[in-house]
């Protein structure tokens, strides 16, 4: 068979030696939305040996303008993103081992996922998950590539524990404007350019080369680029990466864990303990109160009291059309249990 990596091996900084390194490496991608999809496709095509991709969400039509791994039938069937991503990625390159995880990246699974990988890619859309990646990566000394994009701009930075400042060190220079894709929109090119820089830095690390030490900003619409040298900004008393680190984001929460998903009028609730529930038993139980019940392999969707509930196999539930946490928790206790 023709060597599928021949053009990449011709690229001198990678070469055959680099290609052989890539095949031995394992990358974790947190989030299978726009950035996660773009990173995953490039890394799988590049021949990274193993990819684990974790995501808590399912595919909707509003994702299709930029989330390149998904097609209309995924949105019609509300397929979980990491399940659809896994199928698609396996078709792109059957030589790569793909592990799709339908779950939220959180304090319970973060360490187990991160410690067995060579690089973590940030494909998230929020800073609470990024700070959890940051703590976990710092604790287990795994490099990670921060990436974010909204509207027509993006940002990228490689964070190497023990060498560069971490995300916590850079709190004051981070672009935390509170803008999200759901509130101010996003165009596909902003995703592609951000993911391109993330993958490039990732390939450098995986082939034992030094990543860029600058935080890069780009705006494809305005055609503006700028970079900040952040290397002098390591905080010697940082709570995440100094010698007295306490890893505050890795501390476990107890009880129902409720989160408002930004800009979506959606509240996510997780039971205290993980465990698989039978969606068909649940559907039967809710028969008298729920409408338009449908389910696929990973989740069940129904309408109760005019609200759309999406229940995943581990009991995690998204309640759409609610902004009040107490109201959402009441619905969860009443209908889902736990
Ligand atoms: Zn730090």
Image: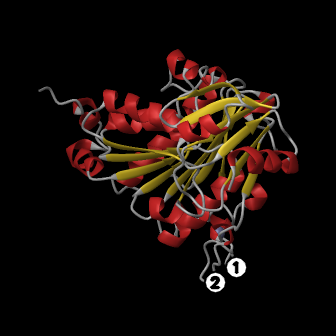
Q: Residue at x 51, y 51 (%)?
A: 276
Q: Position of residue 331 (x, y in %)?
A: 79, 44
Q: Position of residue 69 (x, y in %)?
A: 48, 26
- Quadrant location of ligand 1? bottom right
**As displayed, is residue 70 above or below residue 199?**
above
In whole angstroms, how far apart are the C-alphas of marks 1 and 2?
Answer: 7 Å
**As displayed, is residue 163 above or below residue 229?**
below
Instruction: Residue under label 1, please give it.
Output: 237
| Residue 307 sits in quarter | top right
Mark 1 crowdedness (10 Å alpha carbons): few <14, some 14-19, many ≥20: few
Q: Residue at x 44, y 48 (%)?
A: 202
Q: Residue at x 45, y 42 (%)?
A: 200
Quadrant, the N terminus: top left
Instruction: Residue under label 2, please give it.
Output: 244
Tell me, yes or no, if residue 196 can be seen here: no
Quadrant, the C terminus: bottom right
**As displayed, is residue 284 above or below residue 209?**
above
């Amino acid at each position: 068979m023709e060597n599928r990596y021949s053009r990449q091996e011709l690229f001198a900084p990678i070469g055959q030696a680099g290609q052989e390194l890539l095949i031995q490496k394992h990358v974790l991608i947190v989030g299978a939305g726009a950035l996660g999809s773009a990173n995953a496709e490039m890394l799988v095509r590049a021949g990274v040996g193993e990819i684990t991709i974790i995501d808590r969400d399912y595919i909707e039509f509003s994702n299709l303008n930029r989330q390149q791994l998904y097609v209309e039938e995924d949105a019609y069937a509300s397929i979980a993103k990491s399940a659809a991503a896994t199928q698609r990625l396996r078709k792109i390159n059957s030589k790569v081992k793909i592990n799709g995880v339908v779950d939220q990246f959180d304090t319970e699974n973060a360490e187990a996922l991160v410690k067995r990988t060579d690089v973590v890619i940030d494909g998230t859309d929020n800073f609470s998950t990024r700070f959890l990646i940051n703590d976990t990566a710092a604790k287990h000394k795994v490099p990670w590539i921060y990436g974010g994009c909204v509207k027509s701009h993006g940002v990228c930075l490689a964070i190497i524990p023990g060498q560069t400042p971490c995300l916590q060190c850079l709190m004051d220079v981070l672009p935390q404007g509170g803008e999200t894709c759901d509130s101010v929109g996003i165009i596909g090119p902003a995703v592609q350019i951000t993911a391109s820089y993330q993958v490039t830095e990732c390939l450098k690390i995986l082939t034992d080369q030094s990543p860029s030490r600058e935080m890069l900003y780009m705006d494809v619409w305005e055609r503006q680029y700028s970079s900040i040298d952040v290397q002098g900004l390591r905080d010697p008393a940082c709570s995440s990466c100094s010698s007295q680190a306490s890893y505050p984001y890795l501390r476990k929460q107890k009880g129902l864990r409720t989160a408002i998903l930004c800009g979506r009028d959606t509240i996510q609730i997780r039971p205290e303990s993980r465990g698989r529930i039978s969606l068909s038993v649940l559907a039967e139980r809710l028969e008298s109160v729920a409408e338009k019940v449908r389910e696929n392999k990973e989740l069940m969707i129904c309408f109760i009291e005019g609200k759309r509930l999406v229940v995943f196999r581990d009991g995690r539930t998204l309640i759409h059309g609610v902004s009040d946490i107490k109201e959402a928790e009441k619905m969860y206790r009443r209908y889902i249990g736990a």
